[in-house]
Image (cartoon, grey):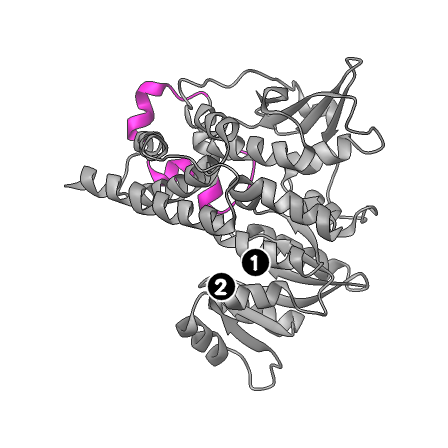
Amino acid sequence: MKSLSILGATGSIGSNALDIVRQFPDRFTVNALTAKTRVAALARQIVEFAPRMAAVIDAEHAGQLKALLPPTADVEIVFGEAGYVEAATCPETDMVLGAMVGSAGLVPTLAAIDAGKDIALANKETLVMAGALVMEKVARRGVKLMPVDSEHSAIFQSMAGQGRNGVREILLTASGGPFLKRPATDFNAITPQDALRHPNWSMGRKISIDSATLMNKGLEVIEARWLFDVDFERIKVVVHPQSIVHSMVVYQDGAVIAQMGVPDMKGAIAYGLSHPRRLPLDVPAPDFAHIGQLTFEEPDLERFPCLALAYRAGEQGGTLPAVLNAANEVAVDAFLDNRLPFMGIYPIIDQTLNHHSGIYGADLGQLIEADRWARETADTLIRRQER
């Protein structure tokens, strides 16, 4: 029996994880659940899974959550960053599933590592912002860090039993998002509703927009660099519209090992939670006889420049990836609020990076300050455009 703290329980990853808990009650129990503001959904989860603790964004939402729960609910409700940290470090918790959206997941994840908790990481921003710091803490505390992103889970599985010394390249596959074949001349007319219609995956709003700009793949490149200790020049992105090959590893003898499956996050989540065991999930294998073609192509960096921007920030390092991530979050929020056009996302991030003087060997305080500065700078740039 493994006790879980699920950070970001009401999102896509968290909900799928709870489906797995529901399916395997003999293997998992829920110790803590967190959400941001979706208190109604969290209340339903609390009633079903009976965690010891629940955390939300602030005192107001904590009050709303308490009012929605029956008097018999035996759960401690906490809030704010301190509350998220408390949920991530509960003594009874064995593993923390980090599925919070954006930079908010960094501090609770670091606290969980310091507390000796194993981590199943779906919050890629944690490694984008503070990869060196996170991996140093993981090594020092001797905890397990399991990737939950489908691509990084695929790489992890493709390296199983092989050893990392023989790796020549990592090939991260990308679906290409909803605008892979859309003419660039039409990009100015893209609406948030258009960008949220991913052709293969069911994801949250922020990650769906990142997929449409290919920034998501850029963030995954930075994440892969830290997870697998591979230089950026050996991490390649390959567009694979069918989303059957989830990623590949090329070895020094030319052999390529790939992990394949239908586009369903349950497999990667379950493997992250249960490794080294595989759970008998009700997920079909690809029907290879009827799939037709599996195709691959290079990403078009002129139409999707955010990918190149992520490589640039990752290669320069220091606080640049934290600034990239923060500016992207602000720009995506502005696009979703119809304050910024789709084609305006890249320039905001680019300009924010250009205004930043990177700090190398940054500590946690400097990374958090870079994140704050980037949000303020990006927001100022957007407001200027609105005048």
Please tell me which residue lies in front, 295 or 137: 137
Disc 2 marks a residue whose amino acid type is Glu
Per the rendering, the mark at residue 108 is 1
Q: Which quadrant holds residue 379?
A: top left
Magenta-tinted stretch:
181-207
Q: Residues within 10 Å of mark 2 (few under 14, many from 20)?
A: some
Q: Which quadrant holds residue 109?
A: bottom right
| Dot 1 and dot 2 residues touching (CB under 8 Å) | yes
Quarter of the image with the C terminus is top left
Per the rendering, the mark at residue 81 is 2
The residue shown at (77%, 64%) is 25
| Residue 22 shows in the view | yes
The residue shown at (59%, 45%) is 133
Badge 2 element = helix
Query: What percent of the width, then of the height, locates residue 220?
Result: 56, 34
Query: What percent of the width, then of the height, locates residue 188?
Result: 29, 27
Question: Is 202 included in the stretch rendered in magenta?
Answer: yes
